[in-house]
Amino acid sequence: MRQQQFEQTHEPLWAEYRLLLQRLERGPGGVRWRRTARERPPPDVRVERLPRLLRSISGHYALARSRGYSPGLVEELHQLVRRGYRQLYRPRPRWPALVRDFMLGGFPRALRRHASAFWLACALFFGPMLAMGLACAQDPALVYSLLEPAQVADLEAMYDPTNARLGRQADDDVAAFGFYVMNNVGIAFRTFAAGLLFGAGSLFILGFNGLFIGAAAGHLTRLGMGEPFWSFVSGHAPFELTAIAVSGAAGLLLARALLAPGPRTRLAALRLQAAEAVPLVAGAMLMLLLAAVIEAFWSASTAIPATPKYLAGAGGWALVAAYLLLAGRSSTGETDDGA
């Protein structure tokens, strides 16, 4: 077989192999494609194909050497074989490294790919929160349209300036941490899973929780309990509230698959969108874990003055914004949406 025919025959396999090596050498997060009108990523660049592809490339390298093909082709195949062996036999990262790489790159990139769903979830969550907060700060009776009198009384007791356990629903820090994790993760997971109700469930949970938080904030501020309330929530709110909005965005992806599956069946579209939504949910859960740590061991402390808490809260919002906008971007200006 002539060299030209040899190259034409095996080039598709070599191209798949090169793309797989690029994905592995880039690390967690996979390949971020630069698509053009003529070029699309192959549908089956899968990590589990590496051993089979490597065996094929090794055979092609041996053939190229034995047949006396050009030194350039032989060297190129040699380098492909060496790169493949390095990836096949390299030490695999342990889970702490995987979590670190996911949070530093994979999660913010995944969220930016679905920025429209995230901003819609933010509008559905923060919009009712702001409107209800302003309304309850003006109308003392409005809070009772959403909360029972007993709930309002409990809320006022939690943020009474004389309360030694500010905002607490548990007796000690560790118990409070466990409560916050279970409560917040539960809300986030329900917000995501409710997207299976054609989006109506996610919309309701986002809107209701926004109204509830806004009602509490407006009512307590009107009663003169603004400082204990705002100093308590300021530290963990950037992470907790953002995570709930992210979970809502994940739920909206499920709704999109059911409402607008395109050329796919609804089941196929749901599988595709679920794969896109899972990184968002995982990132939201880790953000909620961080929020629970802050809420249990920092926010509830009455020994810390209000001013440092406000500064920490402002810094938290700035950190979240910078993280979601910038983390995981490469220095080469690659886009996050594959476009």
Image: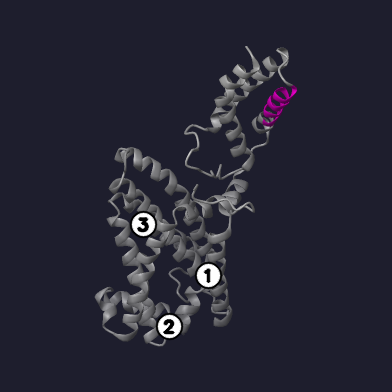
Look at the image and give the residue range highlighted in magenta.
71-83
Q: Would you say 121 lies left or right of 78 here?
A: left
Q: Quadrant of residue 265?
A: top left
Q: Residue at x 30, y 47 (%)?
A: 260
Q: Element at badge 3?
A: helix
Residue 72 covered by magenta stretch: yes
Q: Residue 109: x and y, percent?
A: 52, 52
Q: Amino acid type of disc 3?
A: Thr
Residue lying at 48% horizontally and 49% vertically, measured from the top left: 279
Residue named by callout 3: 191
Where 167 sits versus 121, above or below?
A: below
Mark 3 and mark 1: Cα distance apart in space: 22 Å
User: In the figure, is residue 55 to the left or right of 273?
Assistant: right
Q: Which residue is mark 2?
A: 160
Q: Are marks 3 and 1 in contact (CB under 8 Å)?
A: no
Element class at badge 2: loop
